[in-house]
Each structure stands twice: as structure tokens, then as C-alpha cells.
Amino acid sequence: MDLELAILFLQQGLVSGLVIGSVYALLALSIVMIFKTSEVPNFAAGEVFMAAAYCALFLMVFRALPVWLAIPLTLATSFLVAALFRRGVLTQVAKASGSPVNLVIATLGLSYVLKGLVRRTGYGDTPRSFPALVSTDSVMIGQASLTRLDMAIFVAAVVVMAAVFWLFAYTKVGRSMRAVGMNPKAARLMGVNIERVHMLVWGLSAVISAIAALLIAPKILMTAEMGSVVTMAFAAAIVGGFTSLPGAVVGGFVIGIVENLVGLFISSRAIVVAPFLVIMLVLIFRPQGLFGGRFAIKKV
Amino acid sequence: MRIFGLLLAAIVLIALPFFTTGYVIYLANILLTFTVLCLGLHIVIGEAGQFSLAHAAFYGIGIYVTGIAGTKYGLPFPVTMLIGGVAAAAVGFVIGVIALRMRDIYLALATFAFGEAMQWLFQNWDAVTGGPNGLRIAPAHLFGHEFVTDKDAYPVVVLFALLMIGLTILISRARLGRALRAVRESEVAAQAMGIPVQRAKLLAFGLSAFFAGIAGGMFTLFSTFIHPESLGFSTTMLALTMVVVGGLGSIGGAVGGAIVFGLISELLRQAPSFQEIAYGLILIIFMMYAPKGLFAFLADKFGRARHG
């Protein structure tokens, strides 16, 4: 490979990596948000993402609702389902046993239910394409080519991230979310309604997943298995330390870029495995992730 | 009560090949294989409290190594299974060494990543694993006798399952089992009691992988084909579900969970979308109302009824 081609590949890999990475980053944010407040890795994140995409597809294509109505409806549905799952199911699971494994298994249960439901509707049986809301004309950035849709994805994702950070850093709700994550007992003593915070976090996390789904859906073929994208988001969250919101975003971009560069420079077959090698390397050399805090030994 | 249950299980196991057809025997083989797989997960998660999510990878290593040793090199099956088990255990030890540096969620995620990487290897190392086309496995043989049908393999599968259950009970009652449980409850306290925590964890990972490898070997006894698609995270999750639904931390729970949940998922196979919904609901309801597992739940109800 000569130098000129390598530079071209490098530019294309970086730019495409940033676009897909922004979607991974959103999904990773939604996972990390939940993990920070309740120490549960949400294994249903991928299926929430998938179900939201199908909800939007159903409303826009099969019910022919206008976009301005279909999108808020999708987001609201995602919020409600996730918040109710937290309130109706996880609260009971947590009460029945203190073990986090049980919470994880319950989220796994949700993922199966959602996948099964989408298949029952019959829309999930054949691959479908989602209408693009922004034109797919291409634009050149440097020597890299992108579509307008790609740019819209990136910009929208960054706006959502900024909103999430603002929420966590500057609002009262965000402060109570952080407080619950740090010390639930102390937060309760300070008058935080823990159950409500958990519901809000789950709801918001689902809304972020749904936004990620709406952004990426026009670029990929929709199937009931599309939730598997979430493994990349988990990879991103791990690289970022799993408890850090900025870490999740950086991790998302790192995974997106690595994936694209590996695809361009090594082989497209290696794309799938690259993120896992990145995770293992990061964890072997820095077991708490790039942005994770130091380990605290639990008291006896 | 207990003896009665064991007796019943023995009668069912012995009578099965005389009264049933090929499918039931196949089902029994699969369930027994899953039992051994679950016992391995029980050792690392239930006993030692180390969250390992790479179990399907070790199972896969067992299947491929045993299958290749038998098909390509024509070795008799006890030898091939031993090689498969030891190969899986060796990889398990390496993962254990890495795992010593991590805990909780990071350990779970690192092992998850390892599992995904291994599945990729199974799918893409065409020269050895046959890649996405899968691998044909020749019938296992011993002293010139070939094990062709499910029925041929059944006695051997039962034997191995019983051996591995016995081994699990032995480990659980030995010093090692106590050390593992101490590590699960509190590493700091275990260390203070003079338990070599690092060695205990390494052994847990190695043994768990060995069990998975043997389960893989059992699979090759009655199956003629393996496809890497079935060696991913969903298989790990299936085993984890069985162990948790049966009752995390008890051997009976692991065995019972494997059989009961294996049957449920097999019965629901006819309707894939219903299967997923039912499967998910079972998980959710169990976690909500029977978090200690099916058998603890039944014992609780039964005990309560008896006491009045």
C-alpha cells in the first residue's frame, strides 16, 4: 500500500469512524447511565434500541404518521416502557434478592421478551429499510467522502451528548441521579426519591437508545437481530471505564475509529473481532478502563 | 425423600433407552451435556463467585479439539475427550491469570470479550474449524466399536455426566470447595484465614473450563456436526440462566436447572417468537418471585405446607 492511499484510508477511516462512533457513544451512554445509578449492566439495551427502531418504522411506514408526530411518539413509548420495567419489575427483583446477578438476568429476560414481541408482529421477519430523513448525497471532507445523512447523524448525536452532560452536571435532576449513584442511602436521607430517580434514568436511557436507533436505522438493514450492535456499545463503555459518561463517549469514538481503520487496513472480516481485542488489551493493562477510578477494596 | 428422588432419577436414566424413540434419547443426551456445562459454571460463579461469561468459548474449545482429535487423528474417544478437557482447562487457566487483576463487572466484560473473540476464531479459522461452514465430526470409537446413533452414545454420556456430578460433589466437600466459598464471601477475610486466594481463583477458572471442555466432548459423542453460530454469548447466557433459575450456589440447582430449563427451551422450540417471549417472562418472573431458584422455591413452599 503506498503512502498516498494510506493517508486517504486514514482520513476516510477517521471520518466514518466518528460517525458510527457517535452512535456507539450514545448507546454506551445509555448503558453507563444505568450502570452508574444501579450497578446493573443493562443487557436489554440492544433490544430497546431495536424495538424503538421498529416502533418508529411501524408508525411512519405502516401507520403513515408524519415524522414530527412519529418521532416524539417513539421516544415517549421508549421512555414509558423502560421506566415501567424499572418500576414494575426491577424494584421487585431488587427487593426479592440483593444479588446484582438477578437484576442482570431480569434485563436479559426483557431482551428476550422484546425480541419475541417484534418477531410476533411479523415486521421483524424480513429485513426492512428505514426511510432516510436527510438526503444521502455525498459531501467531501478533506479526501474522505460522507453523506449528508452521516453528517446529520454526527451532529444530532453530539447535540444529544451535550444535553445529557448538561442534565447531569447542571440540573437538580442530574444532581440527584449522581447522588443516587454515589450513595443511595445518603441520597435518600437528603430527600431524593430514589425510585423516581431510577425510573427517570431508565426512561432517559431508553430515549437515548431510541435516538441512536432513529439515527442509524436508515444506514443499516433492520432485522430483529439488529440489537447486536450493542456489543460495540458495551465495548465502548468498557474502554471508557464503564462508570464514566465522558469515558463512554470517548470509548464510542475509539471503537468506531478502530473498527473502520481495521476494516480499511487489515480486512473486513477482522472488523467484528477488533473491538473485543481492544477491550481485552485495555482491561489487561488498565483493568479499570481508561476513565475508571481506582479499585476500592470492599470492606469485610 | 432425597434417596427416593435419586432412585427415581436412576430408574428414568436406565429405562429411557428401552422405552423411547431417537428424539427423546437425543434430548436426554443434550440435557446431560448441558448439565455438565452448568456444573462448570456453578464452580466458577456459584462456588467461587467469579463472574465468567466465556463459558461457551470453553465449550467450543472442547468440541473442536475433541472433534478434530477424533476425526483427523482417529484417536479413541476417552483420549479425545481428555485432550479436549485439558485444552479447555489450559485456556481457562490463562483467562484465570488475567482475571486475577479484575473483579465484578470488569471481569464479566473481559470474559465476555474473550468469548466473542473465540467465537470469531471458530468462525474464521477455516483451515482448522471449517469456518462458517462448520465442522463434520466422525463418530467416536473405542476398541473398534463405533458410536453412530444417539442410543449408542447415551450410556457413555450418562456415565460422563455422573462422573462429573460426582467430581463436583467431591470438590464442593473438599478443602478446595470451602476455600472457593470463602473467596466468594470475602476475599479479604479468606486471605486473612490463610487461604491462597489467587490459587483458589485460578483453580476455579481452570476447573470450570475443564468441565465445559468435557461437556464439549460429550457433545461430539452424539453429534456429527458443529456450527460456530451456536457457540456464542447466547449459549453462555443459556447456561447462566439454567444455573440461576435452578438456584445459584447449589449443585442440585445447577443440575435441576439444566434439565428443567433445557426441557422448557426444547419444548418451546416449535414456536420461535413464543419461545423468546415465554423464555423472557420465565426469567423475569423467577427473578421477581423466586430469586433463590426453582428448587429453593419449591422446598420453601413444600416445607411451609408441611408445617401447617
Image (tube, helix red, strand yellow):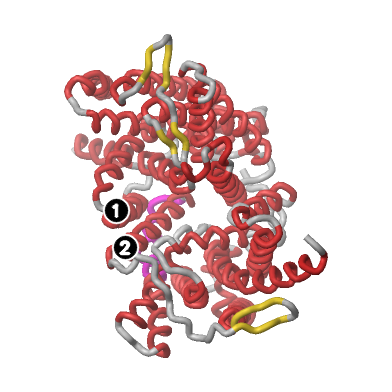
Q: Is residue A96 above or below residue A258?
A: above
Give the numbered dot on residue A193. Answer: none
Q: Residues within 10 Å of mark 1 (few under 14, many from 20)?
A: some
Q: Which residue is at 44% across, 36% downward?
A: B249
Position above or below: B55 against B12: below
**Mark 1 — on which chain does it sit?**
B
Q: Quarter of the image containing the N terminus of chain B?
A: top left
Outermost right residue: A3
Front position in the image: B8 or A15: A15
Q: Residues within 10 Å of mark 2 (few under 14, many from 20)?
A: many
Q: Position of residue A66 (x, y in %)?
A: 37, 90
**Badge 1 and badge 2 in a common chain:** no
Callout 1: SS: helix
Could you tell whether A184 is left or right of B253 in the image?
Answer: right
- Write down the chain letter for disc 2: A
Query: Amino acid type of disc 2?
Result: Arg
Q: Are marks 1 and 2 in contact (CB under 8 Å)?
A: yes
Residue A134 screen position, x and y as percent:
52, 86
Magenta-drawn segment: A82-98
Observer-nearest of B213 and A145: A145
Amino acid type indicated by mark 1: Pro
Q: Quadrant of the C terminus of chain B?
A: top left
Residue B229 position within the rendered picture, expressed as x and y whole percent measured from the top left: 45, 46
Residue A131 is one of the magenta-drawn residues: no
The answer to which image quadrant residue A252 occupies is: bottom right
Which residue is tagged 2? A119
Q: CA distance from mark 1 to mark 2?
A: 9 Å
Q: How many marks?
A: 2
Q: Which mark is residue B272?
A: 1
